[in-house]
């Protein structure tokens, strides 16, 4: 049995937080809202609790977890910040924490090896969600919290979506409404440029913080982590695996309307960026369903908030294939396009279709 507790009134909030704390103290897992997506939280310093996360998500133990800290000051209890990047880390955490920035840093022994899949580095962040903060502050210890979905599946941005993913696998979900960003945190590794000694920020997973948000702190690179990788060993940020964030229905992103060649015997749903006829995709076909990412502003933050919801919605349409219109590849669009690349199934070859 999985229970959902609302946090909508002060009394409900108090009750929900108490129940979450009791669950965490018993080394069990609880789904909590964060400002990015919903997370599946457990005591990061307990191996038993960490095992529950891997079990509930059916996540391989080779895929390390993000660790959430209760306070900024506790950072030094769990990681050793190398001297040469300490100024940059200090600036980043002062300005951007709590918030959707995850830093890769050398771990200390208080973090079990199981949390990092044996890596000497740990991914740490601080959530700004008020419910999450209340739980973790009172708990006083770091919480491991990967996204609250079954492994490889679409992330969750509401308590209902968590229920769809994890009902029966976890005891408790705290409901704080829709996630603020709708996109996971940006994972960054900080180094210094060899020649100049100036700070470099390598984005291992694009996310809710954009290049523009990070630029004041150093040179920003999107070079490694988000290329498709076939195995965990090869991936610097192993969640950047080839198939991830994937709906059950085959999904394809098209560059332009002319790339769409529907089969008569197949049904299709369209995920449209703005829902405008003039973009060329809408009038192309009698779509079984059309889901629009940014119907109001036509802007990226709105699309990001609705992104995972749209993938889930499209997945319930019982169509043969989900077609996605291009999303501008800047700002938050980088994170969405990264997820789409991993969610996409290989398109059927032209040859196979012709026969
Ligand atoms: O916004 C977020 O980051 C959400 C919320 C719930 O906090 N969490 C999240 O966790 O997205 P998850 O487990 O779904 O994704 C974590 C990513 C994975 O790609 C994982 O491989 C990478 O972080 N990661 C974790 N520890 C790492 C490490 N030590 N080195 C490199 N990558 C790491
Ligand atoms: Mg995830």
Image (spheres, grey):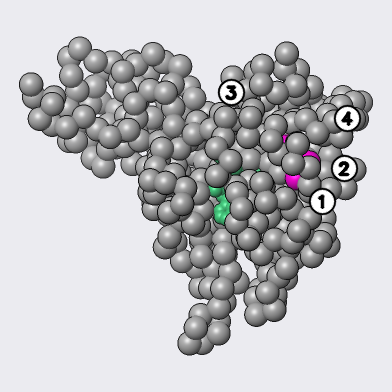
Q: Which residues are magenta?
A: 40-44
| Lower position in the chain sequence, tag 3 or tag 4 | 4
> Mark 3 highlights which residue?
165
Q: Residue 24 location, x and y as percent?
A: 82, 34
Q: Is residue 278 visible?
A: no
Query: Looking at the image, do the residues carrying marks 2 and 4 touch, with CB atoms under 8 Å apart?
Result: no
Q: Residue 22 location, x and y as percent?
A: 88, 30
43 shown above or below 174: below
- Secondary structure state at the residue bearing disc 4: helix
CB at mark 1 closer than 8 A to ligand 1? no
Q: Nearer the viewer, mark 4 or mark 1?
A: 4
Label 3, residues with CA under 10 Å away: few <14, some 14-19, many ≥20: many
Q: Nearer the viewer, residue 196 or 42?
A: 42
- Secondary structure state at the residue bearing disc 1: loop
| Lower position in the chain sequence, tag 3 or tag 1 | 1
> Mark 2 highlights which residue?
139
Q: Residue at x 33, y 41 (%)?
A: 326
Query: Looking at the image, do the residues carrying marks 4 and 1 touch, with CB atoms under 8 Å apart?
Result: no
Give me the C-alpha separation between circle 2 and circle 3. 26 Å
32 shown above or below 101: above
- Secondary structure state at the residue bearing disc 3: helix
Label 4, residues with CA under 10 Å away: few <14, some 14-19, many ≥20: some
Asked which quadrant contains residue 16, the reply is top right
Q: Residue at x 38, y 23 (%)?
A: 249
Give me the C-alpha separation between circle 2 and circle 4. 10 Å
């Amino acid at each position: 049995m999985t229970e959902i507790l609302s946090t909508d009134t002060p009394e409900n909030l108090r009750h929900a937080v108490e129940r979450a704390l009791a669950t965490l103290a018993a080394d069990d897992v609880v789904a909590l809202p964060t400002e990015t997506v919903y997370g599946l939280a457990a005591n990061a310093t307990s191996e038993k609790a960490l095992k529950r996360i891997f079990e509930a998500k059916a996540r391989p133990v080779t895929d390390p977890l993000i660790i959430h800290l209760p306070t900024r000051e506790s950072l030094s209890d769990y990681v050793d910040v190398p001297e040469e990047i300490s100024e940059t880390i200090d600036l980043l955490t002062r300005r951007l924490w709590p918030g959707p920035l995850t830093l890769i840093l050398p771990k200390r022994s208080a973090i079990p090896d199981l949390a990092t899949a044996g890596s000497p580095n740990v991914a740490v962040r601080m959530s700004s969600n008020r419910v999450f903060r209340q739980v973790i502050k009172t708990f006083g210890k770091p919480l491991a919290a990967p996204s609250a979905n079954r492994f490889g599946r679409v992330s969750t941005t509401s308590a209902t979506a968590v229920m769809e993913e994890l009902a029966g696998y976890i005891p408790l979900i705290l409901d704080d409404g829709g996630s603020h960003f709708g996109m996971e945190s940006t994972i960054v590794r900080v180094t210094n440029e060899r020649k100049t000694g100036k700070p470099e920020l390598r984005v291992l997973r694009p996310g809710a913080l954009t290049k523009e948000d990070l630029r004041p702190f150093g040179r920003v690179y999107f070079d490694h982590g988000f290329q498709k990788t076939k195995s965990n060993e090869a991936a610097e940020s192993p969640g950047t695996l080839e198939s991830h964030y994937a709906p059950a229905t085959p999904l394809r992103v098209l560059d332009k309307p002319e790339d769409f060649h529907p089969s008569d015997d197949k049904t299709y749903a369209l995920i449209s960026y703005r829902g405008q006829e003039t973009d060329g995709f809408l009038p192309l076909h009698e779509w079984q369903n059309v889901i629009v990412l940014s119907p109001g502003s036509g802007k990226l933050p709105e699309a990001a908030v609705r992104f995972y919801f749209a993938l889930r919605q499209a997945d319930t349409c019982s169509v043969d294939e989900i077609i996605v219109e291009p999303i501008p590849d800047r700002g938050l669009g980088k994170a969405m396009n990264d997820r789409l690349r991993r969610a996409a199934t290989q398109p059927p070859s032209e040859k196979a279709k012709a026969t």
